[in-house]
Amino acid sequence: MNASHPLPVNYENFREAIRDFLSEELTPQLTRAGELTTSVFSDFEAGRHWQRILHAKGWGAPEWPLEYGGTGWDIQQCYIFLEECRLANAPNPVMMGIQMLGPMLMHFGTEAQKVDFLPGIISGEDVWCQGYSEPGSGSDLASLKTTADREGEEYVVNGTKIWTSMAHYSNWIFCLVRTDKTVKPQAGISFLLMDMATPGITVTPFSSLDGEIEQCQVFFEDVRVPAANLLGEENQGWTVAKYLLEFERGGQHFTIDLKKQLRKLKDRVSSVSNAASDDPTFSFRVAETEIDVLALEQTELRIKGSLSSGENPGALSSLVKVSGTELGQRCAELLVEAAGQRAMPWQSDVLSPTYAGPTAAPAECVTTMAEYINSRATTIYGGTAEIQRGIIAKHVLGL
Ligand SMILES: Cc1cc2nc3c(=O)[nH]c(=O)nc-3n(C[C@H](O)[C@H](O)[C@H](O)COP(=O)(O)OP(=O)(O)OC[C@H]3O[C@@H](n4cnc5c(N)ncnc54)[C@H](O)[C@@H]3O)c2cc1C
């Protein structure tokens, strides 16, 4: 066989190899962090530690092209890898660098930017956050007001970003900024990469409904950024941003998590007798949800196929985002119903992987309510469900 006719992959052997690696490398503390994950982010230190282990093995960004440190695995191998990681309760590293910025750097970046930034992303040394939304500019992102004025070989940035997930742990931020106020909104936006240690940047974390602190407001006051940190052309940031959003929406793996939630749900229903689990209409809702998850899996795999052959997923990623997040909310609701009052006790310190004290709720229910609350945000971030439906109506249905 030569390089153009690679040997067929034995997926069962591949899955076994992944399982062996996971059982060797995942410590009890890492899996505890995975079990206690109630949003897309696990405990930060556990996630970062895990990213370093993956990187040392050469698996830091499995889906990236080989030349940038990827694995060369096909879509099915990448899928199996993620599925096994989730099933083994590996913690989630902060993925904004790997899933969002990395593909943008490969597509729009200069050679120098690729060399400067890609290695730190894949190794986990650099943690990136996404500075798009502003107070007053979320769905209507093109109205953003943070400015970047060119002065010689620098931009001077002023303004604020909000809902910036994990900014308090990040040492870099990729931002949309206004570089021209005289043209129509989309035409005056640029994409800047900023070192969070630059004087004039302040980060203020705030807590979400469940008491966890993952989001921040970031303030910029006369922040001087080298012009070399512009990604793409000046005033072409909207093109970069749209490309990135398609990766954010389409590059996720909803069905792996959904299948895990369904498994949890079925275990809970079979192990406990209560009003919900004894109700035949409840079983019907679980079955209906499972069918919808299996249908979504096919669309998700189709998107992965188009991504791996270099196409971008386009409006299909909106479809997957709406279905994946709404199904996640359905699963989270069913899990609360199945847990009944056992989901009610609230004790936020229990969600820390180092917590070793008593728990008010039974062990299998300590994350149930927090997961439910966090699931409400999934149809808001990355573009709300209403906005996605608008995109589908226009670009898929041609309405
Ligand atoms: C948990 C969480 C994490 C986030 N993380 C980040 C992050 O890391 N980086 C970042 O940049 N942003 C982040 N965001 C921000 C997120 O992208 C925005 O909240 C989102 O785009 C919605 O914007 P908004 O909050 O300003 O709501 P608005 O845009 O004000 O929307 C309010 C309501 O009006 C509806 N609406 C608005 N316009 C239309 C329309 N044209 N048609 C129909 N309905 C419409 C919306 O669907 C929504 O229901 C995060 C948000 C959350 C909740």
Image (spheres, helix red, strand yellow):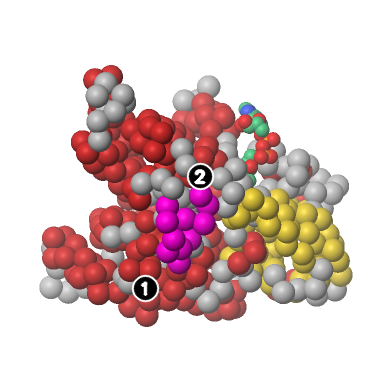
- Find residue 325 and report its image quarter: top left
Q: Residue 225 at what x, y percent from top left?
A: 76, 71
Residue at 73%, 42% (x, y): give it: 137
- What residue is disc 2 on? 346
* Amino acid type, mark 2: Trp
Q: Is residue 245 above or below residue 277?
A: below
Q: Quadrant of ligand 1?
A: top right
Q: Is residue 60 above or below residue 41?
A: below
Q: Residue 40 at what x, y percent from top left?
A: 47, 52
Q: Can residue 354 be found in the magenta stretch?
A: yes
Depth check, mark 1 against mark 2: the one in front is 2
Residue at 51%, 49% (x, y): give it: 347
Residue at 17%, 74% (x, y): give it: 2
The span picked out in magenta is 347-359
Q: Are marks 1 and 2 in contact (CB under 8 Å)?
A: no
Q: Can residue 377 be found in the magenta stretch?
A: no
Earlier residue among tags 1 and 2? 1
Picture quarter with the N terminus: bottom left
The tag on residue 54 is: 1
Magenta residues, dominant SS class: loop
Q: Secondary structure at mark 2?
A: loop
Q: Is mark 1 within 8 Å of ligand 1?
A: no
Q: Residues within 10 Å of mark 1 (few under 14, many from 20)?
A: many
* Amino acid type, mark 1: Leu
